Image (tube, helix red, strand yellow):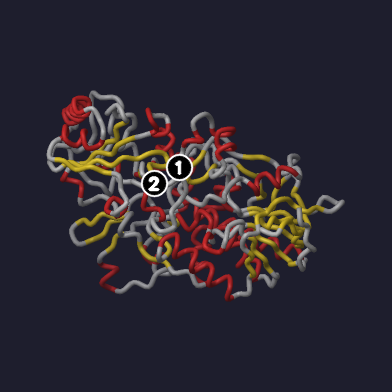
Amino acid sequence: MIRNMAMEPVDVLVVGTGNAAMSAAVAARNEGASVLMVEKGPREAVGGNSFFAGGGFRFAYDGIDDIRKLIDLSEAELRAVDVGSYPASKYHDDIMRVTEGLADPDLAGRLVGQSFPTMVWMREQGMRWALMTGRQAFKVGEVYRFWGGLTVEAVGGGPGLIDHWLRIAEAKGVQIRYEAGAHALLTGEDGAVRGVRIRTPSGFEDAPARAVVLACGGFEANPEMRTRYLGQGWELAKVRGTRYNTGDGIRMALDIGAQAYGHWSGCHAVAWDAGAPPFGNRVVGDLYQKHSYPLGIIVNAEAQRFVDEGADFRNYTYAKYGREILRQPRQLAFQIFDDKTRAMLRDEYRIARVTMAEAATIEELAEGLGLDPVALKSTVDRYNAACQPGHFDPTVLDGKRTEGITPPKSNWALPIDTPPFVGYAVTCGITFTFGGLRIEPSTGQVLDDTDRPIRGLYAAGELVGGLFWHNYPGGAGLMAGAVFGRTAGAAAARSISG
């Protein structure tokens, strides 16, 4: 195997090119450090999982005046939106609620406290933001009313986020090397990290650095690791994002004594179009997702409901319902809607590459979806009979529920009785894994298995463990990547100049 000469040393080497990695690289460069990013994939794979994200960022804000610090809004636009507020206490409570109280309090506290300052910092670097009117708001009268604590996205979604980060990083003089997969961490006799051994098409090379930031994702694209840690059947899940997130950063760090931390048997997994390819498609991006299920019902291949579609806003349930779909026969589920709510479905339901059927009757819909017509008609009839009176309002937890069926539907329970009927076939799409490395929250420095910091080693993004358990609030992943990427990159640069 070819072994090339070592590359020229840099101050900070960042592994990965996604949102967390870009945040780290730009923060380190702002501190005056020379920065090299290494990417396992080719140039056309830049951005990692972040390219496939919707681009939404969850942050604490007090009201429209904070939003105006991120987005220039005209007076007409201001009159047309109701963003409400999302105080830090609510953000923190949401994290603890959906993670069943297991989120590391120091990680959660830093994420919440630094969320808005980091959004402002990103805008100062050149990031562009927009209101999420298409995905996180319903029009009530003449006003778009936002719901679920999520209001802002990067212009252009995930692809736009990465495009802007790439321009920012390159303008600041950050170097990026592609087809350079991180293989092992280089350490000195004192145990400090001194660089990374990378694997290229020509062989192995040593890339020396005074500090390293690992930001190359979890192990969701590694079927062996998925099955080992998440459990039986997870090798069957489709991967929403990049094929290159195979756990390399985690493995390298554990090999030198880093501490494993977090929910290693947990992950973010969603309803994903049943006809989607095994890995993310950069043309379709995140539009294979199907997240309007609170407006209808979900049945499995036996035409039986198996979750409470209205348990909470979709951004507090979607990340865990993928796991429930994987547990169903044939790893399939079907989202059923009628004409009353069809116009309210998110944009992803209207793309050309969608696995769906439409019919004038429930029985005909069942045939189009490959379901038993009698079974689906019985399920829909029981659900319709259980729907209780009340005011339907998709912008709040409206309490319009079912009674007398299991599982219940706790909110937004409208009967499915108005043709034409539509159904969408979905499976489990895994986004990222929750287990990873333990870091010191205020610096991003990786800790060893005795809680001591490993000199020269920092981490950010999806390979940091301890923040998300069982579930996560939508938009918190990108926000955590930016917060801890910025933290790690700045701290890495300061450590070599101090």
Rendering quarter of residue 168: bottom right
In the image, residue 198 above or below residue 77: above
Q: Secondary structure at mark 1?
A: strand
In the image, taking residue 397 as reference, residue 475 lies left or right, namely right
Mark 1 to mark 2 CA distance (whole Å)? 8 Å
* Amino acid found under the numbered disc labelled 1: Lys
Which residue is located at x 44 percent, y 44 percent? 94
Mark 2 = which residue? Answer: 276
* Amino acid found under the numbered disc labelled 2: Ala
Q: Secondary structure at mark 2?
A: loop
Would you say residue 279 is visible in this rendering? yes
Mark 1 = which residue? Answer: 238
Quadrant of image for the C terminus: bottom right
Q: Is 281 in front, or is 112?
A: 281
Residue 8 lies, in percent from the top left, at 77, 68
Circles 1 and 2: CB distance less than 8 Å?
A: yes
Residue 192 lies, in percent from the top left, at 80, 53
* Sooner in the amino-acid sequence: mark 1 or mark 2: 1
Mark 1 burial class by Cα count in 10 Å: few <14, some 14-19, many 20+: many
User: Label for residue 122?
Assistant: none
In the image, taking residue 394 as reference, residue 490 lies left or right, namely right
